[in-house]
Image (cartoon, rainbow, N blue to C red):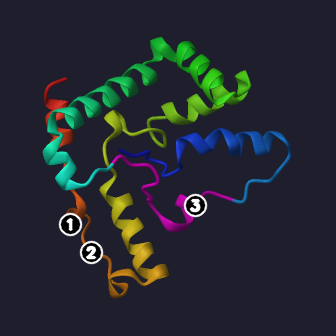
Amino acid sequence: MREKSGIDFPIRPFRLQAEQLGLRRLGDAVALVGPYLSTACFVMRAWAAAHTEDLVRYLQAYVLGLRWALDPANRAAAIALLGRHLRLTPDIAAASYAMAADPATGIAKDGSLDIAGFANVLRIRAEVEGQWGGVAPSPERYLDLSYYARALSSL
């Protein structure tokens, strides 16, 4: 699951709070490095095989939660939840929600995985940390999206 912007959503309120306190924003990491997968749900293949029904139900609940939260009809309630559970002021909660709900840069529809962002994470790790001998593997090596597809197909 990912966000199109590549910025971890729970951190966004902190960025907004820092700006509100007068700190300067230094820029957007995605503009510098390209697409970046910062938030994802993952499990080991053996665990997924042993807990298929639990995993599918979890993914269904996650997708339904995103759909509810991003439905404009639930905007006020979602902002209130953000404010209450993250202890945000109403203006920061509303701004955080607006960022998350932005179709261009916010949370991806149904929490879909950003393959390009994941590939870039692997590339950066190979380049900076020297993993895989400096050559990033294909993202598909690590992916089995069949559980996600199954969850979506039954919603």
Identify whether 6 is placed above or below 150.
below
Element assignment for label 1? helix
Residue appearing at x 21%, y 40% in the figure: 148
Label 3 packing within 10 angstroms: few (<14), some (14-19), many (20+): few
What residue is disc 2 on? 137
What residue is disc 1 on? 141
Residue 8 x %, y %: 53, 47
Q: Disc 3 vs disc 1: which is toward the camera?
A: 1
Asked if residue 32 lies in the magenta stretch, the reply is: yes
Please state if 110 lies on the left or on the right of 87 as rendered. Answer: left
Amino acid residing under circle 1: Arg
Of labels 2 and 3, earlier in sequence is 3
Label 2 packing within 10 angstroms: few (<14), some (14-19), many (20+): some
Residue 107 x %, y %: 44, 38
Q: Nearer the viewer, residue 154 or 102?
A: 154
Q: Which of the 4 quarters of the picture holds residue 76?
A: top right
Label 1 packing within 10 angstroms: few (<14), some (14-19), many (20+): few
Q: Are marks 1 and 2 in contact (CB under 8 Å)?
A: yes
Q: Quadrant of the C terminus?
A: top left
- Report the magenta residues as a range: 27-41
Query: Main SS of the magenta segment?
Result: loop
Asked if residue 124 lies in the magenta stretch, the reply is: no
Identify whether 49 is placed above or below 97.
below
Q: Is residue 144 visible?
A: no
Amino acid residing under circle 2: Pro
Q: Disc 2 vs disc 3: which is toward the camera?
A: 2
